[in-house]
Amino acid sequence: ISDEFREKFGGEAIDEAVGVKCGITTGSNERFVRYRWEVLKEDISVNYNEDNKKWVGYTKGGPYNKWYGNLWTIVDWENKGYGIKHILDDRGKIKSRMGNEASFFKEGVTYSASGSKGITFRYLPTNYIFDVGGSCVFPKKYLNNFYTLAFLNSKLCFYIANCLNPTVNVQVGDLKRVPFTYPSKDYELSVQLLAENCVKIKKKLCSYLIVEQNYSHSPITPVSSPESELTRYYNYENALLTQILLNEAIINRIVFDVYELSEHDRQMVLDK
């Protein structure tokens, strides 16, 4: 990296602006974790602080996926996770690990830390507990959740994360060291609106996926010509995904401007 780019690391790190949190280890996923379709819908919590139901949303990372999704699993949190907190190994020691319980059920950003395509970040709704593999980012000093999500999904953040850890598994400690530059109000609002639109689009597409928590119905309706119906849906899906790509291109340009990157450094990031 250039000397000018290296100077960006002399400022504030992202962990000072937002909280990067590592989640829990249950000690026995076979006992405590289920896919959503393995449990009756009425047994899954909508608001744990009010309904205290046994099963609550559980984010575990998952495959490469930006903006929204991978919300497939639930975890047994009966009696505030008593079973998980007291599970023992053969030597009588606690097998589970409770990380950052104070951040459970809050709105934030979750991510998949490992994968050959790189790290990806997604909007995290309220009422979720997070796993070590699906660690999260929460507002702290900087409060705009959607700008944070957009920055983390930008090419610049991917590039910096790769500089800090060139393996396929980005650790929480690596992410905490990413330099963070505060945007102007105009840039912040523009990026926020684009990020909200990306989340809205992905959430709509997730409503057609039977594994997702917001699944509503199949996008394919019974017609005389299945081929034409499939073509119609794929054209529709591709149009929405293209809109996300266009939004991301604008976000990348604005983030470059926020960090005041030179033309050389911008090209360096894009080439990588």
Image (tube, helix red, strand yellow):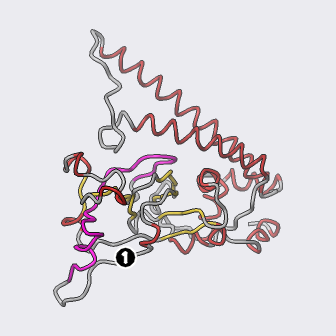
Q: Where is mark 1, residue-wise? A: 98
Q: Residue at x 47, y 46 (%)?
A: 68
Which of the 4 image quadrants contains residue 223?
top left
Residue nearest the observer in this picture, 265 or 23:
23
Q: Secondary structure at mark 1?
A: loop
Residue nearest the observer in this picture, 176 or 171:
176
Which of the 4 image quadrants contains residue 198?
top right
Q: Residue at x 35, y 57 (%)?
A: 50
Q: Is residue 217 left or right of residue 185?
A: left
Q: Is residue 202 left or right of residue 262?
A: left
Where residue 241 sits: x, y (%)?
52, 34
Q: Is residue 98 above or below residue 218?
A: below
Which of the 4 image quadrants contains residue 105?
bottom left
Q: Is residue 171 left or right of residue 31?
A: right
Neighbour class for label 1 at 10 Å: few (<14), some, many (≥20)? Answer: some
Where residue 27 sits: x, y (%)?
26, 74
Task: Determine if the magenta segment contains residue 37.
Answer: no
Q: Is residue 54 above or below residue 222?
A: below
Q: Which residues are magenta?
A: 63-88
Where residue 219 sits: x, y (%)?
35, 25
Q: Residue furthest top?
A: 224
Quarter of the image for the C terminus: give it.
bottom right
